[in-house]
Amino acid sequence: MTNPTTILQLATTTATSKRLKRHHHTTEDDRHQSLLPGIPDHIAQLCLSLVPPSLLYSVCRSWRRLIYSPSFPPFLSLYALFSPTESQPHLSNSVEFCSFDPISCKWQLLPAPPADPPLSFLFRHPSFISRKLPIQSVAVSGNLVVLAATDDNFLPALSQPLVFNSFSEKWARGPPLPAPRRWCAAGTTRGAVYVASGIGSHYNTDVARSVEKWDLTNQRQRSWIWEKMGKLKDGKFSRDAIEAVGWRGKLCMVNVGRRDWEGRGRIRGEMPAGWRGPAAAMEEETIYVVDESKGSLKKYDHVKDAWVEIVENEMLKGAQQVAAAGGRVCVLCADGVRITVVDVAAARQWVVDVPSGFQVMAVHILPRLSHSDFRTK
C-alpha cells in the first residue's frame, strides 16, 4: 500500500515543478514579447518614449525593462553620498555612493570606486564635535565627480577627481590636480568643472587665489587636463567648502555674507539681498535658493532683479544642500536623513527617506542607471 505521505510529497513536488516551469516560460515569453503587437520594436520604442516612464513601469514587464534599457531616453534620478550615522561607530568614516530610482522608489548602490590608491575620507573627528569635514562633489554632463575631501592626516584626500559616468556605470580618474586641495569652491558651468581657492597640505596664497578649469565636453579621457584661469583677488574662499553655482556661463560663489558673481575669476557684480542658504541652478537658467531660517524656497528673477518665493515648509529650515534639474528641486534636510523634492511648476512637495543607519552628505541629479538585459528584436 502506498504511503499517503509519499503521495502528498510527490503531488507537492509535481505542483511546484509545474509552477516553476510556468514561471520559466512566462519569464521567457516576457523577455521575447513584442513591445507593441504588430509593430517592430525599434518603432515601438519611438512611440513609447513619448509616454511618461512612470506609466510604462506599471503596465507590463517588457515595458518596465524598456525604460531601463540603454537605448531608451533616461529619466532623472537622485544620486547621493551616504555616510553611516553615529549609531554605527565601526563605519564612522566609510562612504557609500547610491542612486534613488523615482519610478521604483528604491535606493541602489553604485559600483565601488577604484581603490588603487586606497581611498581615505575623513568627515568625523573628535576635534570637530559640531562639524563634519566635507566631501565636495558636483554633477556635470551625466557624471558624478568627487573633487575634494580630507584624509586621516588632515591632508587633501584626492590628487585626482573620481568620476562616475551614469551611462557606462563605471568609475574613472580625472586629470591630476595641479595642487590637490580641500575646503575649496567647486562648481560647474557649460560642461566644465571649476575648482577655486582651498587649502593644500598647508595654507598657500597662490593656491588660495587660484582657479582651475577642467572641460568635460572633451569626451577623450586622455585629453582631460586642468586649465589655469585668472586669479581671484584674494583667498577668502579658502575658509570653507563652497558650492559655486553655474548660471549663464558665470559662477556665483557665496561666502561670509557676500554675494559675488565670478566669471573666469573676475567679479561681475553682486546679487540682491535674499541669498540666505544653499542654492542650485536649473539647467543654468534659473537659480533656486533655500532661506535656511525661514524654510522657504525662492527663485531668482533676473529681469526684476529680485527673489520670488515658491513654497515655504518647516522641513526646509536648516537645509544643507540643493540640487535642481528637470523641473525638480531636491533639498537635503537639516537632519541629513530626508530629501525634500519640490516640483517647482506645481509647487508640489514630497519626501524621499534615506535608508536606516545612514545620512546623506551630498545629493545630485543625474540620468538613471540602466539595465542591459533588454534587447530589441
Image (tube, helix red, strand yellow):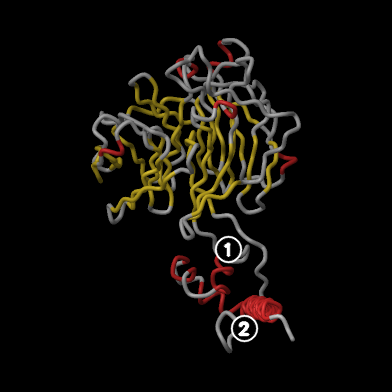
Disc 2, SS: loop
Q: Judge from the rendering whether residue 187 lies leftward or rightward of residue 272; answer left or right.
A: right
Q: Along the line of sight, which residue is nearer the eye, 344 or 190?
A: 344
Q: Judge from the rendering whether residue 279 lies leftward or rightward of residue 155; answer left or right.
A: left
**Looking at the image, which residue is at 50% across and 59% down?**
75
Marks 1 and 2 sit apart, C-alpha to C-alpha, by 19 Å
Q: Amino acid at mark 1?
A: Tyr
Return the mark for residue 68.
1
**Looking at the image, which residue is at 59% across and 21% down?**
150
**Looking at the image, which residue is at 52% across and 75% down?**
60
| Residue 81 in view in this figure | yes
Q: Judge from the rendering whether residue 21 lies leftward or rightward of residue 306; answer left or right.
A: right
Within the image, what quadrant is residue 91 found in?
A: top right
Q: Along the line of sight, which residue is nearer the eye, 163 or 333?
A: 333
Return the mark for residue 40.
2
* Residue 276 x, y percent position in the rendering: 30, 29
Quadrant of the rendering where the C terminus is positioned: bottom right
* Residue 225 x, y percent position in the rendering: 68, 34
User: How busy is the neighbourhood of tag 2: few (under 14 within 10 Å), some, or many (20 plus)?
Assistant: few
Count of numbered circles in the view:
2
Quadrant of the rendering where the N terminus is positioned: bottom right
Q: Earlier in the sequence, mark 1 or mark 2?
A: 2
Q: Amino acid at mark 2?
A: Pro
